[in-house]
Amino acid sequence: MAAPNPNGGGGDDVALPMPSRNPLPLSASQEAQIRDIYHARVRDACAPEIKAFADCALNRTFTVSFVCREQLRAMNGCMKTHATPAAHDAAREEWFAKRLERQKERERKAVKKAQQEDFIREWWGLPEKDAETRRKEEEKMRMTERIGGYAARDRKRWEEEQAAAATATAAAAASGKR
């Protein structure tokens, strides 16, 4: 089940699947990225109202709340109509759709960093990196973006619980037949 391409075009882009409407908890920085997309969309939709309020509030201090009340209400009303859970879900879907793009960008940066390090080592006559360090960096560069947190070491996994329940059921059934 692949998510539709938000750009609309049918290019060479490979769309990664949207895990679900409410996927595993994302990290704080990932949630912040989603909020940034969400807030930017709301600001873009309400740009004229925000501009009108900003123009009214310019060079005012105490009297802003009295003089610019109509513009403030128009701006807040616009933001309330556009800041909906559906808009937040759309921002989340856009963030998931751009996973592949972010991964390619990270790979480009890592390659550029490696080239710069090689140049500096060559320029200053420094020894080469050992093969193990270079292999680990290349492996890290190829890793995909992590979605969801890491499970606690001492927490039972769902599969393990199911297997334990199945063995307990089988043992109880076997002892009941005797």
Image (cartoon, grey):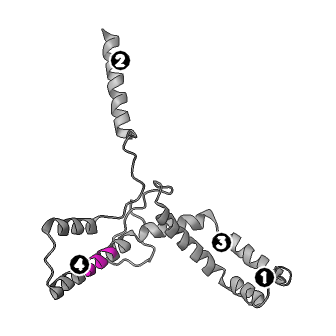
Q: Marks 2 and 3, how far apart in space?
A: 57 Å
Which of the labelled discs sits on residue 162, or is there none? none
Side of 143 relative to 89 (left or right) = left
**Residue contact at pointers 4 and 1, CB within 8 angstroms:** no
Judged from the image, the secondary structure of the residue bearing numbered disc 3 is: helix
- The mark lying in front, picked from 4 and 1, is 4
Q: Earlier in the sequence, mark 1 or mark 3?
A: 1
- For the residues labelled 4 and 1, the Cα–Cα distance comes to 52 Å
Q: Nearer the viewer, mark 1 or mark 3?
A: 1
In the rendered image, the quadrant that contains the N terminus is bottom left
Residue at figure coordinates x 55%, y 68% from the top left: 35
Task: Name the one closer to the observer, 139 or 176.
Answer: 139
Q: Which mark is residue 114?
A: 4
Q: Residues within 10 Å of mark 1 (few under 14, many from 20)?
A: many
Q: Label 3, on which residue?
A: 82
Q: Earlier in the sequence, mark 4 or mark 3?
A: 3
Q: Residues within 10 Å of mark 2 (few under 14, many from 20)?
A: few
Which comes sooner in the sequence, label 2 or label 3? 3
Label 2 with label 1: CB-CB less than 8 Å: no
Which residue is labeled 1 in the image? Answer: 71
User: Considering the image in quadrants, where does the C terminus appear?
Assistant: top left
Query: Closer to the N terminus: mark 2 or mark 1?
Result: 1
Q: Is residue 140 magenta?
A: no
Decide which of 99, 11 is in the foreground and name it.
99
Amino acid type at circle 3 is His
Image x and y of residue 52, in percent = 73, 87
Between the C-alphas of marks 2 and 1, the distance is 71 Å
**Would you identify the image quadrant in which residue 77 lies?**
bottom right
Q: Amino acid at mark 2?
A: Ala
Q: Bin the neighbour count of mark 4 within 10 Å (Cα to Cα): few under 14, some 14-19, many 20 and up.
A: some
Q: Which residue is mark 2?
A: 172
